[in-house]
Each structure stands twice: as C-alpha cells, then as structure tokens.
Amino acid sequence: MSHALWDIPTRVFHWSIVILLPLAWWSAEEQDFDMHRWVGYSVIVLVATRVVWGLIGSRHSRFSDFLVGPAGIVAYLRQGRSDSAGHNPLGGWSVVVLLLLLLAQGISGLFNSDDILYSGPFYYAAPDALRDAMGVVHEWAFDLLLGFVALHIAAVLFHQFVRKEPLLQAMVRGSAVGRQGLAPGRGWWWALLVAAIVAGLLWWGIGQAPQPDPGRWF
C-alpha cells in the first residue's frame, strides 16, 4: 500500500510560503503596512506550526526523518544518494535554514518601525538597542531569504529536469512515481489545531503589548 510522501500540512506550508514571500516584498514596496503586518503574522504562525509538526507530524515531515549529522552529509556527497524517502541531507538542512530565516524575519518585524507610518506591535515594549538590532535583522534576513530562495529554486530545477526526480509533482500531489511515503500520514486536523493554538497565543501576546502614550505627541 502506497502512502503520501508529503502530507497536506507540509504541502500547505510550502505553497503558502511561496505566496507570502512575494506578497511581503510587494506590500513593503507599496507601503501597504496593514497587509504587510498580516503577512508577517501569517508567516510566524506557519513557521511555528511547521516546527511543531516537525516534531509530532507525519513520518516524513518530522526532522528526525531527514536531518543527519556531518557523516551523513559527507556520505551523501560521495555517493549521490540518500536513504530518506523525502529530503536528502542537504535538502533537509535547507529546510532548517529556511525556517530560521523566516522566523527571524517574522519576529524582527514585530519590533520594527519605519518611524512614520508603521510600528510593530512590540516596538514600544523594546529598548532602543533592541529596536535597532531588530531593524537590522529584518533587513538582512529578507536579503538572505532572497538568496536562499534563488538557490532553492535552482536546486529544485536541477533535480527535477536534470536528475529527473519528480519533486514538484510530489509537492503538489503528495507523492509521485519513485517518491512515495513509507508510512501513513497523521491527520491534518492536528496541524490545524496546532496552528489555531499558535495563532491564539500570538494574538494574545500582541494584545498585551504596550502602546504609545498619546500625550507624548502634544
């Protein structure tokens, strides 16, 4: 009996990020900070949910299924093949890098401000040094994300068209010829529950953030 390699939550996360990253760039360029804020919140919820799903989710969505140590990476580079049905060792660690960069981008935005039209919800809760640091992180994390995304696309195209591995088909349909799961996936509603809890905690935290004193403008 065949099983999906990538479960529904993993695929939803992947394609949601594909949509949200360009939207984050566009909304910032157009100074649509209301949209930019909600895109940032969505990224934080998605990443946090994906991290939890990497611990409790379906077999091939778990970090333990595709993360290996240095010896495993060296063996893969030498042999050109991986024992995992899902990500190869380099692809597995690229997932971690992506999650860290997205998390840095999203969290730093909570403390960011353009000093004119927009201030993140935790901007007034942070000392000046932290605000400045988060501003730098927000800028550099996105630049690194752009480079990482370009590298990721190049790697996917190489494996898809040169090595003839149906990566795109598997990420759209869940599985493809030669890329099938070895165990049944966990119910997608568990991921939805995790996302709801994360979103609720983020909403609560934002609600606790101090706001500027209106009197200081007069």
Image (cartoon, rainbow, N blue to C red):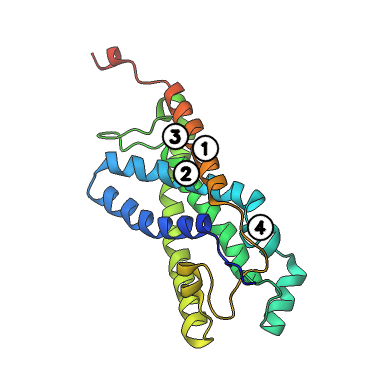
User: Residue placed at 51% from the left, 72% from the top?
Assistant: 170
User: Of label 3 and label 2, which has the lower sequence position?
Assistant: 2
Q: Could you tell me how many numbered marks the image carries? A: 4
Instruction: Classify 10 Å Cα crowding around label 4: few (below 14), some (14-19), many (20 and above).
Output: many
Cα separation, mark 2 vs mark 1, equals 9 Å
Residue that carries the numbered disc 2 in the rendered image: 44
Three-letter amino acid code of the residue under disc 3: Arg
Classify 10 Å Cα crowding around label 1: few (below 14), some (14-19), many (20 and above). some
Amino acid type, label 4: Phe
Dot 1: what SS? helix
- Residue 108 lies, in percent from the top left, at 46, 41
Q: Which residue does the numbered mark 4 point to in the structure image?
A: 63
Secondary-structure class at tag 4: helix
Q: Name the residue beneath numbered marker 3.
A: 131
Three-letter residue code for mark 2: Ile
Which is more N-terminal, label 2 or label 4?
Answer: 2
